[in-house]
Amino acid sequence: MRAEKQIPQRYTVEAYLQMERASEVRHEYLDGAIFEMAGESLAHRDICTNLIVELGTKLRGSRCRVLSKDTKVRNGALSSPRRVMRGLFSYPDLVIVCGTPQFHDEYSDILLNPQVIIEVLSEATEAFDRGEKFQRYREHLSSLTDYILVAQDRPYIEHFTRRSAERWEMISYEGTDSALELSSLDYRLQLAEVYDRVEFLPTDDVAEEPPFETEAPQGLTRLLLKQGKTVMIELHPKVLEKNGKKEFVMLPYVEFVALQEILADAEDVLDLRAAKFL
């Protein structure tokens, strides 16, 4: 699923949940900011359906179950939901929970103890899924043992496995002849089943973009989302001191590249407003 546009206001967790439960459109929450979820490609839908069928069949009768992408996952403890504006509430494409599910409240729609999270990557959110989102999953979800990223433009899967509190290992699988070893569930997931009915564009038809870094020099900005020719960046606290409290900024990708070059030569914190980037 893709986060499409930011709602131009900051919300407490309580306000977000009240709005979300009354909304027909799904939104993710990140530190007070709310992002509307956009539609899916046919490949994205096919991959999610295949995963639900394969894993649901495998886990039938076991202590584990597959939860759909309408289930939110909460990251971190909440001491005061009425006032807090920090945290991540996300909608993974697929979640597996083993044992008794633990939920945020009586609505039973916000899971606290996922064991496996699967995300089908899109151009808009790949940087976020790999970066900020995975970092928060690692830090706040002690129950999480497996994080799986599934490409939709080719048969390719990256599987991150927790080996200890501080150490994760990654194994990649490519080609429909491959099989992902999901040892936590004692299961081999065939990529041919994951990508059943998915049609890929010929390599020559896929437009290539110049590579981009997800973290700017000196750590002044961090790329969170990339959607088409636009990116969303998170500003470093030192920059916020100079430019107010606009923590998340949307700007054209070409300007982000130019900003990277400027920061590479900066000797001190740059006044970004003077550079006309804000």
Image (cartoon, rainbow, N blue to C red):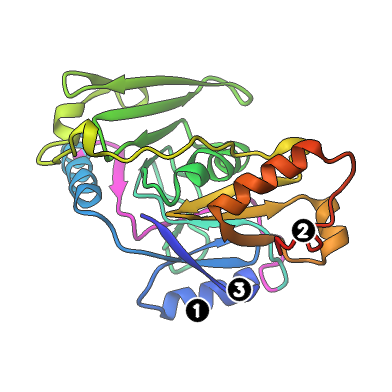
Q: Mark 1 points at which residue?
A: 19
- The mark that comes first in sequence, 2 or 1, is 1
Give, as a three-letter code, the residue at label 2.
Ala
**Residue 31 counted in the magenta span:** no
**Which quadrant is home to the N terminus?**
bottom left
- The mark that comes first in sequence, 3 or 2, is 3
Q: Viewed as shown, does residue 210 lie left or right of 244?
A: left
Principal secondary structure, stretch drawn in magenta: loop
User: Where 144 falls versus 269 (above or below)?
Assistant: above
Q: Is mark 2 on a helix, strand or loop?
A: loop
Question: Which residue is drawn at the image coordinates 31% and 39% (left, top)?
Answer: 64
Q: Where on the picture, by quarter, is residue 201?
A: top left
Q: Estimate how packed mark 2 is, as few (under 14), some (14 to 19) or many (20 or more) residues with alpha carbons within 10 Å.
A: few
Q: Distance between the residues labelled 3 and 2?
A: 37 Å
Question: Which residue is drawn at the image coordinates 89% and 39% (left, top)?
Answer: 267
**Which region shows up in magenta?**
60-82
Using the rendered image of the protein, determine whether residue 131 is visible from the camera's viewpoint.
Answer: yes
Give, as a three-letter code, the residue at label 3.
Glu
Q: Viewed as shown, does residue 46 lie left or right of 223?
A: left
Q: Name the residue under label 2.
A: 275
Question: Which residue is drawn at the image coordinates 77% and 50% (left, top)?
Answer: 236
For the image, the number of numbered tags is 3
Q: Estimate how packed mark 3 is, as few (under 14), some (14 to 19) or many (20 or more) residues with alpha carbons within 10 Å.
A: some
